[in-house]
Image (spheres, rainbow, N blue to C red):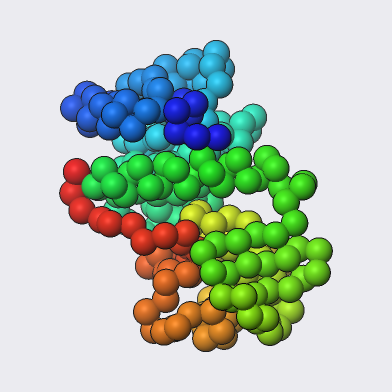
């Protein structure tokens, strides 16, 4: 999928921000529809096919968290939350409810478009996962059939748990994975929320894939929320 065929639903009650995002998307070659309320958004989703939904949480009729949960009952459309709510707990709740990413206002157009492209690309990869045998991000590759990992073309020796963790990130590159999700996926839902075990596992993986584990470039920390495998550097700044 390329940017000229992607269609995006903007759910935002602030007309100034809504028009700004529409303008940016149009300039980048994307088609878009607008909704100022949760109800109108659900109506548009039921009648049209979209490649991504940009969702503000502070809607006049329903809270955005409820919209995420409702949409996830019947659709896997990528959801990028764009909200002024900047509390870590709310970010984690939105991601655990089913959002794919979270962008806090204010944001730069560069970051917005980068997040959009990553979300659409990730959705496309998920749809073609059945035939995808090698997952690659920059100089890091994982062969699913051989269970082999290479970095800059050289074999990388990982423990089974490190392999499972890296596989999760490569399957969800660009997407924020919450701490709760990672613990459940690696150790099981009955393991609780032992963040210390996850931090130790993450530290071991970073030592093997990062040139400088103290300043990671592949797996970055989303403070108070979780972690993200980044495909490229993203410039940040106000819109």
40 relative position to 14: left or right: right
- Residue reaching furthest to the right: 145
Residue 183 horizontal/vertical position (percent) = 62, 68
Say if 106 sits above or below 193 in the image: above
Say if 30 sits above or below 146 in the image: above
- Label count reads 0
The residue depicted at 40 percent of the width and 47 percent of the height is 115
Q: Quadrant of the C terminus?
A: top left
Q: Quadrant of the N terminus?
A: top right
Residue 104 seen from this side: yes
Q: Considering depth in this image, is 159 or 196 the residue closer to the camera?
A: 159
Residue 63 horizontal/vertical position (percent) = 39, 34
Say if 57 sits above or below 160 in the image: above
Q: Considering depth in this image, is 105 or 196 the residue closer to the camera?
A: 105
Quadrant in the rendering for residue 163 = bottom right
27 relative position to 200: left or right: left
The residue depicted at 24 percent of the width and 47 percent of the height is 108
Residue 192 seen from this side: no
The residue depicted at 48 percent of the width and 80 percent of the height is 210
Residue 197 horizontal/vertical position (percent) = 59, 81
The residue depicted at 38 percent of the width and 47 percent of the height is 114
Residue 141 horizontal/vertical position (percent) = 63, 67
Q: Considering depth in this image, is 142 or 81 the residue closer to the camera?
A: 142
């Amino acid at each position: 999928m390329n940017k000229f065929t992607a269609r995006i639903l903007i759910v935002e009650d602030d007309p100034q921000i809504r028009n700004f995002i529409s303008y940016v998307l149009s300039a980048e070659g994307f088609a878009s529809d607008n909704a100022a309320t949760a109800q109108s958004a659900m109506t548009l989703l039921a009648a049209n096919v979209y490649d991504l939904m940009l969702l503000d949480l502070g809607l006049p009729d329903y809270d955005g968290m409820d919209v995420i949960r409702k949409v996830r009952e019947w659709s896997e459309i990528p959801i990028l939350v764009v909200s002024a709510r900047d509390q870590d707990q709310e970010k984690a709740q939105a991601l655990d409810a089913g959002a794919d990413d979270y962008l806090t206002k204010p944001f730069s157009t560069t970051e917005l478009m980068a997040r959009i492209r990553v979300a659409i690309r990730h959705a496309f990869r998920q749809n073609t996962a059945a035939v995808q045998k090698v997952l690659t991000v920059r100089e890091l590759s994982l062969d699913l059939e051989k269970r082999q990992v290479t970095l800059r073309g050289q074999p990388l020796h990982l423990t089974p748990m490190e392999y499972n963790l890296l596989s999760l990130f490569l399957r969800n590159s660009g997407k924020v994975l919450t701490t709760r999700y990672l613990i459940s996926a690696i150790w099981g839902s009955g393991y609780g929320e032992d963040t210390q075990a996850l931090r130790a596992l993450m530290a071991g993986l970073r030592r093997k894939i990062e040139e400088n584990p103290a300043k990671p470039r592949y797996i970055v920390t989303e403070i108070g929320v979780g972690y993200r495998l980044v495909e490229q550097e993203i410039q940040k700044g106000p819109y």
